[in-house]
Amino acid sequence: MIRTLQWRDILRLWRLQGRGQYLDLERYLVAGYPLLRLALRSWVIPDVRTYVGHVRARHAWYFLQTVRREDRPEWDVSFLTPADALAGPDLEVWHRLLHQAVRDAVHKGVYRLYVALPGESPLISLFQEEGFRPYSHEVIYYRAQAVPAASVTVGRSRPYRPEDAWEFRRLWQRLTPQVIAMAEGFTAQNGLTIPYTWTPRPDNRIYLWELDEGLVGAIAVRFGPRGRWVRFLVDPTQGDAVRSFVAWGVHKATLGWQGPVYCTVPQHVGGVAGVLDTLDFVPVYERTLLVRHLAVALQADATTTQSVLSWLDIGGEPAFSRSVELPTAHPCRCGCCPGEPALVENRTKQWRYT
């Protein structure tokens, strides 16, 4: 049985949370992850969904929670329990829970579902079987206390301003591999061009590094009552100046803070890990980032859709932020060929009405 959370499930969730796994580490380590409070919010505010699986014959219970990313059409799979039940008949329940979460996300108009899993976790294959695709790998560094203040010169560094959006987008697109840009960024047709992790918010401040040739780096600092979370975007062609910028960024993030500090270093960002080592940061966690692109299945192929839009004079432009596999009819169209369609095309075009 698969369903959403009910009042009678709160005590079961509380008992099982010790066997669970927090997948949204940034929220858990920096701001704290109020699992039960978020679960209760799902009845009032539609930005949290908690799914419950129950196998009556074995008296086994399973919980999966998803959380929306602010006001964006993106959600994170943030918590599951029991995380140690990943074999045999348990896998079937997890598949059904994930399938229900994906199905609900499609009905809500969600563009993407994200999840961050431990580097070698068996959960990776489970999520891949449900359509999630890995797109990046990163290492999380940790320091128990803030870095002592130091005098570091990095040229012109300043907070992010709204008028920097265009130039920052160019910097991010230039330094980010295409597979990551397609997973985290939206095309201009959708109006969302900066990834969630680099979006200025009250708890997420962006600082820019500027030289004569323009922007060459940026840091994002997430503030919370339990810690600081820092990520870097740097141009590796700046050489030794990268070392000074990373050191300055860590000092800036920990200014007036005496608690733990976390830095995440994606696999494509070079020159940062070595500097963190000199600042006594320790690599403590590796994780793989996965994304599930969502879309409503079309009943007609792209050429038919385009012609209909043209005939109705409402226009249409292809947007590549969503993808879906569309089965096509058998080439002979005889109607006598049993079984599945002979051809399956992976089309990423969806039409935006204007």
Image (cartoon, rainbow, N blue to C red):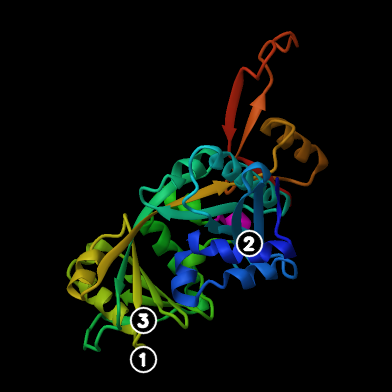
Name the secondary structure under disc 1.
loop
Amino acid beneath label 1: Gly
Q: Of the numbered discs in the image, which one, if any, rests on residue 256?
A: 1
Disc 2 from disc 3: Cα separation: 39 Å
Name the mark nearer the viewer: 2 or 1.
2
x then y, percent, for residue 191 = 61, 61
Specify the quadrant that holds the N terminus. Answer: top right
Q: Of the numbered discs in the image, which one, if any, rests on residue 298?
A: none
The dominant secondary structure in magenta is helix
Residue 296 in the image: above or below residue 205: above
Amino acid beneath label 3: Ala
Q: Which residue is mark 2?
A: 12
Q: Nearer the viewer, residue 67 or 11?
A: 11
Using residue 234 as the reference point, say whether residue 350 is left or right of it: right
Taking the spot 69% from the left edge, 70% from the top edge, the residue there is: 41
Q: Are marks 3 and 1 in contact (CB under 8 Å)?
A: no
Taking the spot 49% from the left edge, 56% from the top edge, the residue there is: 184
Along the polypeptide, which appears first: circle 2 or circle 3?
Answer: 2
Badge 3, how many Cα within 10 Å: few under 14, some, many 20+? Answer: many
The stretch in magenta equals 186-190
Q: Which residue is mark 3?
A: 253
Residue 324 in the image: above or below residue 253: above
- Queried whether the magenta region covers residue 189, the answer comes back as yes
